Amino acid sequence: MTTIVNGESRRLEDGATISALVAELDLAGRRIAVEVNREIVPASEYAHRQLRDGDAVEIVHFVGGG
Amino acid sequence: MVEPLRTAENLAEGALILAGREYRSRLIIGSGKYRSFDENRRAAEAAGAEIVTVAVRRVNIVDRKSENLLDFIDPAKYTILPNTAGCTTAEEAVRTARLAREAGIGDLVKLEVIGDAKTLFPDVPATIEAARILVREGFQVLPYVTDDPVACKRLEEIGCVAVMPLAAPIGSGLGIRNPYNIRIIIEQSRVPVIVDAGVGTASDAAVALELGCDAVLMNTAIAGARDPILMAQAMRLAVDAGRKSFLAGRIPRKLYATASSPLDGMIE
């Protein structure tokens, strides 16, 4: 299936969970927040929340700012 | 006998109470524009800051860096104040604040809704709208706002934990453009007043504290200085001097001179 992750098209295995995506991006254990189709997904749901074809995922973290 | 130098730590009125927490430092610094995370870390230490602002952005999934800001600005040591910088609508700002909270830093948010790209002046109606939503959702909101006493009053009434009027446009370094408005805001406010944006040099920070501001927030003034670490030290001293000067009570301004030496006993 194809998802959009941070604006970039990304192919994932069918039924991939958010945990799988986060691990693939080497972000496990990082202070991040995840939105799927503009809805925040709590970290406690990453392991069982499966992504679907066409899902728009946003993964954010903290960067320098004033 | 020499009086011991009173420092923020032992000055009775030394503590800044913000959202129920006590801080010894009245200097809040940003984390943007530093040449490296390590320079940012050293500047925070030199400034004696206890609160550091951060922005919320997409993780770069194409070019992942192994270093992370929060590896240098340790959330166990600093209060991290996420901002909604770059947002131009209440909706975007609320969305950004929710993401920041989800990332596990806490309920504090520096609310920023920009109304004009050139001046980066805040969109006050949108800021008020977003503040209302965020306060209802349990956020502790610190809004960046124009130096407008009425806007600050509204934000306080909504339940913001502080108001943060600008001194001058973000990054302009122009210093406090309207000290009289800032003074009015200080007099009317029952929440901390933090001057945010526009400080250029140490004397600007001292003026903010002399006026009675509870704290000052700056980023570019330190990060953009030729020697950011030295400037961070200068800002720390200026904030301390300004606060003490405010507490000590300045003399009134007069048009004419008043002799400092007695006139009695002059030789004839």
Image (cartoon, rainbow, N blue to C red):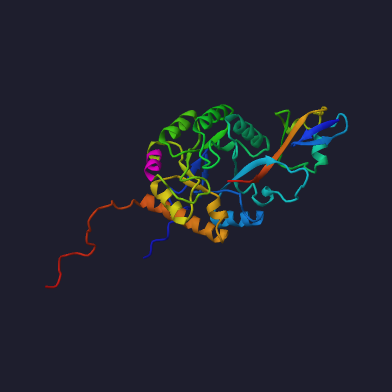
The part of the chain drawn in magenta is: B179-185
- In the figure, is residue B251 to the left or right of B10? left
Q: Is residue B7 visible?
A: no
Q: Whole-percent x and y of residue B119?
A: 51, 42
The residue closer to the viewer here, B11 or B111, is B111
Reply yes or no: does residue B173 show up in magenta: no
Quadrant, the N terminus of chain B: bottom left
Looking at the image, how many numbered discs can be counted on the residues?
0
- In the figure, is residue A56 to the left or right of B251? right
Q: Whole-percent x and y of residue B100?
A: 65, 37
- In the figure, is residue B205 to the left or right of B60? left
In the displayed structure, B155 sits above or below B264; it is: above
Q: As drawn, which residue projects farthest toward the front?
A: B118
Q: Whole-percent x and y of residue B229?
A: 57, 59
At x 86% / y 29%, what residue is drawn?
A15
In the displayed structure, B1 sits above or below B210; it is: below
Quadrant, the C terminus of chain B: bottom left
Q: As drawn, which residue projects farthest toward the bottom?
A: B268
Magenta portion: prevailing SS class: helix
The residue closer to the viewer here, B69 or B89, is B89
Q: Is residue B238 visible?
A: yes
At x 69% / y 50%, what residue is drawn?
B71
Q: Whole-percent x and y of residue B34?
A: 62, 54
